[in-house]
Image (spheres, coloured by chain):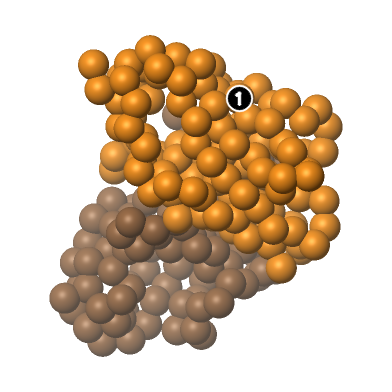
Chain colours: A orange, B brown
Amino acid sequence: AQSVTQLGSHVSVSEGALVLLRCNYSSSVPPYLFWYVQYPNQGLQLLLKYTSAATLVKGINGFEAEFKKSETSFHLTKPSAHMSDAAEYFCAVRNQAGTALIFGKGTTLSVSS
Amino acid sequence: ETGVTQSPTHLIKTRGQQVTLRCSSQSGHNTVSWYQQALGQGPQFIFQYYREEENGRGNFPPRFSGLQFPNYSSELNVNALELDDSALYLCASSFTGELFFGEGSRLTVL
């Protein structure tokens, strides 16, 4: 069965600092992996996705993630944090049937000036 | 602007009541999924509809039911509400597999 684990429920960075949000996955088949962002009182917005093409995936708003099969990881990074990046971030893996996403518990990113 | 709209945005019910939540999918999207997001948790898959048929279901009891209409809009019905049903209910539509989420309906059960 597929699952994801997000390490760290809360990450705090200073504006301009590197952002690193960690996600490890478990999957019995080659995974399709996703990162979503959720701003307060809003739905989920897709940041980027990995679908077995390039292992380094670039997304919106300057975010990128690298798929590492040997480490079963799909960590999200951004070189320089901006105040507007403060939000909840969710890692997800598609289920084997292809009918649903299985989400992690989320990581809250705080950005201080 | 994702094009997925949900109603109502907020509602309050009491235990034992029934609720219906509505979702209009993005134009051209024939698949609708529903997720429950409890406070401080990630979304959990309830079910998915494709061309008016349920084609996937998560670990939710039968009192959670749904419909998809010919125009691909959808309803989520929850009977016999329990306190633990308090959550944000998210609808997502898709056509090629990528999910586009609405802003959700926040249900409070007292």
- Give the image location of residue A21, x and y in percent: 49, 36
* Left or right, A68 with reference to B41: right
A21 is higher (above) or lower (below) than B10: above
Look at the image and tell me in which quarter the C terminus of chain B lies. bottom left
Q: Is residue B26 visible?
A: no
Q: At x 54% / y 64%, what residue is drawn?
A: B45
Q: Which residue is mark 1?
A: A64
- Give the image location of residue A4, x and y in percent: 60, 55
Hey, which quadrant is residue A70 in on the image? top right
* Left or right, B92 with reference to B79: right
Q: Nearer the viewer, residue A87 or B53?
A: A87
Hey, which quadrant is residue A113 in on the image? top left
Q: Name the residue type under label 1.
A: Glu
- Give the image location of residue B5, x and y in percent: 42, 44
Q: At x 55% / y 77%, what residue is drawn?
A: B59
Look at the image and tell me in which quarter the N terminus of chain B lies. top left
Q: At x 74% / y 38%, what residue is drawn?
A: A68
Q: Residue furthest front?
A: A71
* Left or right, A91 with reference to A26: left
A12 is higher (above) or lower (below) than A26: above
B76 is higher (above) or lower (below) than A6: below
Label 1: which secondary element? strand
* Left or right, A83 with reference to A58: left
Q: Nearer the viewer, residue B7 or A104?
A: A104
Q: How many discs appear?
A: 1
Residue at mark 1: chain: A
- Give the image location of residue B71, x and y in percent: 59, 52
Q: Is residue A66 visible?
A: yes
Circle 1: is it few (<14), some (14-19), or many (20+) Cα within 10 Å? Answer: many
Q: At x 39% / y 76%, what residue is drawn?
A: B78
